[in-house]
Image (cartoon, helix red, strand yellow):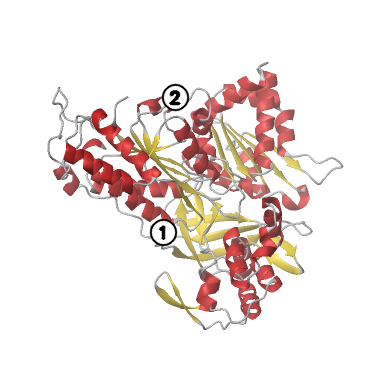
Amino acid sequence: MTGPHESASALTAEQWNLVETLTGMLTPEQARWISGYFAGLDVGLLRAGGGGAPAVAPSSASAPAARQLAILYATETGNGREIANALAAAARERGLAPTVADLGEYKIRKLKDEHDLLIISSTHGEGDPPQPAAGFFEFLESRKAPKLPDVRFAVLALGDMTYEHFCGAGKRLDERFEALGATRLLPRVDCDVDYEEKADAWREAVLALFESVAPATSAPVAAAAVTRTVPAAAPRFDKRNPFPAPVIDSIILSGRGSTKETRHIEISLEGSGLAYEPGDALGIAARNDPALVEMLLDSLGMNASAPLIVRGQSVDLGEALARNFEITVATQRFLDHWAQLTGTNDAFSVMSSEERAAFLHNNHILDIVNAFPLKGIDPQTFVDGLRPLQPRLYSIASSLSIAPDEVHLTVSPVRFDLNGRRCSGVASGYLADRIEVDSSVPVYIQSNPHFRLPDDDRPIIMIGAGTGIAPYRAFLQEREARSADGRSWLFFGDRNFRTDFLYQTEWQTYLKDDVLTRMDVAFSRDGADKVYVQHRIREHARDVYAWLEDGAHVYVCGDASHLAPDVHEALLTVVEEQASIQREAAEDYFRDLQRDGRYQRDVY
């Protein structure tokens, strides 16, 4: 048996002393990183400056092979893409040459040849991956996934703490890459909806790490190329700086007697420089209901004029609660914060995770404050437990080709009773109840590259219910403007034909003018038996399958918890029956469609 000094005979005594000293200072996570670092060098130790000759050169005396850096992202709303692009730009400024790829379009066969991976992944719903990246997750978690002993990786996970499986998709990637033998560069970072600060810190940490090992991390960018690179001009208005857009019109679409209200809202973008494509979304920077702000202030015994510091700026408490913070839905973070302040930790610590989720579902922040009162709390301490108020995204229901300098929305305000009071959705209530014609709404464009029209000669099948009809209005406006000759088929569902047939006269005109080839509707409350769009799909199974075989692109827009899975099940059944194949083969059929961009969903 050899001792440590004998097994390290390639090192001098001084070098070995340095190694032993460093080892005693490292955490297990840091030790694993160091192991991956030296494995990536493929040569002896670099001198202290990083640029000298190896202390012990290999016999070939060749330079260390450059490692490739890839930035991969999985996104549903575009936040992951934004972070990935910012990371890539910062990496290039430091002389690195990363590639950037959407996991929805990433060529899976490349995975085994990757070197260093920086992965940004959002989570959709209860721990699911973003829909465009579902195929990558399925492959990575299957037996087909390759071993990755030469890969180093770091994961930034995006999520929402109101969901039980917070950052579930990012956690799955982090655990799976480790299981496949890859080396974790840094511990995973989990971000709530206010991700910016954590994401910025993670970006700086990984880039600092790569800078320290740049000769073996990526192919260097020539200095001249770096200094001459001019970044693309950022849009003048974006999520952090929305455009104050005037409201042109707000019309109730639903008929008298409807069990729900649906509005068509037209907004001017004139002078903003903002542009969009059919399939994109409009971000709305909404304000909280003033009545809710007043109730919360009363329950807390606080003055609206109390001073606060928010993101380095001085602001009155009342204005901050209206504009800056989420004050409706409570999160686990707020519950823990309030329990600590009120000394009621025991009341919640005995709850199971399911009981806590149910409690948060049935109680908003105001309810918790009233149930566990605390007077005299400092306003700054209170808001430390709140999340920033996030913009809401709405599918755009118009095309710039038909409505230049305008953007149209289809909005159904969320209204419900909770603990004896009437509540409404933050953004939908803002748009429906508190925004008048000629007033302004802060907006920005959120690109959605995974919900795009195909070439003009390709057939399309559009499936939606309720306000999920919005992007298809934009699709047909665009096709009309381009005189597209591809066939189009619309499946639309809602509650009642008489009161909820949204944009009925427009669809009829499109049918008459052959812009829309075919339309099938389902109104769930008009008969004894409830009929939904998935039933219409099955009724016309032969024709649906014929369109698919003829190259049709399929779109689904609407509710993620019911519509999307029910429609997917109906489509699988259609292919299974019409092609006389097993369920697994039908699932492969739709995986291929999704990979080829022919099966796209915009669900919420």
Coordinates of residue 115 in the picture (x, y in percent): 33, 32
User: What is the residue that sits farthest to the top in this orientation?
Assistant: 580
Q: Which residue is mark 1?
A: 197
Quarter occupied by the N terminus? top left
For the view shown, which residue lies furthest in the right direction? 528
Helix, strand or loop at mark 1: helix
Q: Residue 4, located in which quarter of the rendered image?
A: top left
| Left or right of residue 257: residue 604 | left
Q: What x and y, as percent, mark residue 508?
A: 66, 43
Q: Which numbered tag is attached to residue 146?
A: 2
The residues bearing labels 1 and 2 have C-alpha atoms spaced at a distance of 34 Å
> In the visual, does 317 lie left or right of 370?
left
5 to the left or right of 181: left
Q: Residue at x 81, y 46 (%)?
A: 525
Q: Position of residue 376 (x, y in %)?
A: 59, 82
Q: Earlier in the sequence, mark 1 or mark 2?
A: 2
**Front in this rendered view, residue 221 or 527:** 221
Q: Secondary structure at mark 2?
A: loop
